[in-house]
Amino acid sequence: MSRIGKIPIAVPDGVTSEIVDHTIRITGPKGELSFTHAQGVTVTRQDQELLVTRASDAKRHMALHGLTRALVANMVQGVHLGFSKRLDLVGIGYTVEQKGTDLLLNLGFSHPIYFQAPPGIEFQVSNRNTSVAISGIDKQLVGQVAARIRALRKPEPYKGKGVRYSDEVVQRKAGKTVGGATA
C-alpha cells in the first residue's frame, strides 16, 4: 500500500470540501480549487479528514493513489495558507520592477522583458528590486511561473549571474587560467 496515499488529509477550520463523482472542490479563505481524479481512486470525507483509497492493487491504481493524495493535500494547504517561491536576480544591472500586477525584468539583454501574471498569481518585489516573491494558491502554477521566470536567464556557472531560486546553490566553475610557457 502507498505510504503517502494512506495518510489522512486533515482539513483545517475554515476550509470546506465538496465531493461530487470524481470531482473534488476545496474552498478556503484564500480561494477555491477543484480537481478531477482518475478512475480507480476514491476520495471520501470522514469528520475533519479526507481519505484516499484505491480500488485494487493494480500498478496503475497504486501509482494514482499517492499522487491523488498529494494533489488533494496541496489543494487544502493552498486554499488555507497558500504557496510562495522567491527568486533572486544576481548580476550588475539585473533588476525587476512591478508594473501593476505584472513584472518588468532587466536581465542584461538589449531590451527589458515584460512578464504578465497569470490569473491566481501575485508578485511582490523587494525594495532593492533584485528579488521577487511569487505567491498563489495553486502549488503547480506557482512553481511553473517561477520556473518560466528563471528560464529567462538561468544562472551561469562562471560568475553566477542570472535568475535563481533564493535557496539555490550555483556550482561555480574555474575560469580560464593564463599559463606561461615553462622551459
Image (cartoon, rainbow, N blue to C red):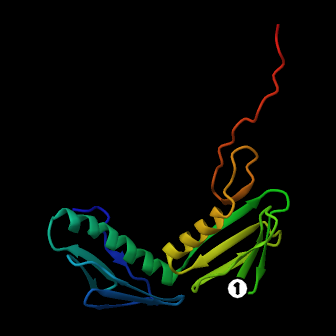
**Residue at the spot x=55%, y=69% of the render?**
143
Q: Which residue is mark 1?
A: 101
On screen, residue 48 above or below 160: below
- Name the side, left or right, on which 93 lies relative to 152: right
Say what amino acid the circle numbered 1 marks.
Thr
Instruction: Tell me the quarter of the picture where residue 88 sits.
Output: bottom right
Residue furthest toward the top? 183
For residue 54, say whether it is visible.
Answer: yes
**Residue at the spot x=39%, y=74% of the render?**
71
Total number of numbered discs in the rendering: 1
For residue 5, say whether it is visible.
Answer: no
Tell me residue 81's x, y (percent).
Answer: 53, 79
**Residue at the spot x=44%, y=75% of the render?**
74
Which residue is more in the foreground, 111 or 30? 111
On screen, residue 108 above or below 14: above
**Residue at the spot x=63%, y=54% of the render?**
168
Residue furthest toward the front? 110
Tell me residue 145's x, y (percent).
Answer: 59, 72
* Secondary structure at numbered mark 1: loop
